Amino acid sequence: MELLQIQYFITVARLEHVTEAARTLHVTQSSLSKTIQRLEEDLGAPLFDRTGRNLRLNEFGIRFLRRAERAMLELEQGRLEIEDLTKHEHRALKLAVTTASTLPSILREFRKQLPDIQFHVQMLTTQEMVTLLRRGEVDFCLCSPPIQNEDIECQIVCVDPVVVAVPAGHRFAHRTSISLIELKDEWFVGVKKGYGTRDWVDEVCRSVGFEPQYIFEGDEPARLSALVEAEIGIAFIPSTARYARDSIHYIAIEDQQLAREIALLWHKSRYISRAAQQFREVVVDYFDAFTSSGAAK
């Protein structure tokens, strides 16, 4: 069994298509097919069910992929650890988030400490984020709600109350607090299903007797305030995402403990570079200061 065979197998297993895998790996389809066949011969079992150029992992393939990805992750962590110890420059940090309202402030503070750092940030659904984390393709995830899993380390960094944002001319704009059931006939703007906070808030609303009616669903949480300001609909907004605008009024929810937990996630088996450790410290310190200031209350 060769390392190249493992690398090729993982790519084919993820794409389940020979042509796309060959294009990704920059090899010919025939070379790729022969490499996979040799691997199957070495293992003594087929790893895919085949229909033309389309492949689907069978039970053997699913089991082997799990261990192959773990083995490749360990080798990659070894490379990163040596690189971190021998090179002076900081490698890029790769981040995935389901909540981005606090990210600019966190990155600004971190850049003060390590001005040469490079970032790559992706806004993803919860499932997409977990997939990349398990593959070792991101260093950290900042998400809500938290994710508990045997291979993922989860550190709660903030308890963030959720409020209702309404335009200044709304019939509830004079209120300082409101019962959740009073919102049952309202039109909402929000992110799409699949984002943790949206799914969780919808579930709480259903528990008190109504299903939120959405007139807009998007994938940019930062745009919700602008939509509220334009009187398109009202929105559930975390306290960390509030904007100080006269045209938007924020109302506390009085009868439900509607507060999201923000968590920092990382893979338990992944090597944490010195730069990444410092980033984690900045995140924890930021939310400690945020909570102490009373901004999340």
Image: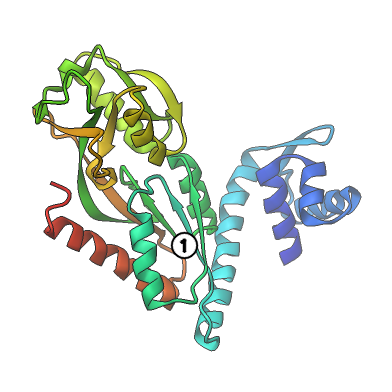
Q: Amino acid at mark 1?
A: Asp
What residue lies at 37% left-to-right and 75% top-to-bottom? 112
Is disc 1 placed on a helix, strand or loop?
A: loop
What residue lies at 81% left-to-right and 50% top-to-bottom? 23
Q: Is residue 188 above or below residue 32?
A: above
Horizontal side, residue 217 vs residue 175: left or right: right
Residue 287, quarter of picture: bottom left
Residue where numbered disc 1 is placed: 139
Q: Nearer the viewer, residue 103 or 232?
A: 232
Q: Position of residue 95 (x, y in %)?
A: 46, 57
**How is this picture coloured?**
rainbow
Q: Position of residue 48 (x, y in %)?
A: 72, 40
What residue lies at 16% left-to-right and 56% top-to-bottom? 291
Q: Nearer the viewer, residue 9 or 178?
A: 178
Residue 98 appearing in the image: yes
Q: Is residue 92 above or below residue 134?
A: below
Q: Position of residue 289 (x, y in %)?
A: 18, 63
Q: Quadrant of the N terminus?
A: bottom right
Residue 184, quarter of picture: top left
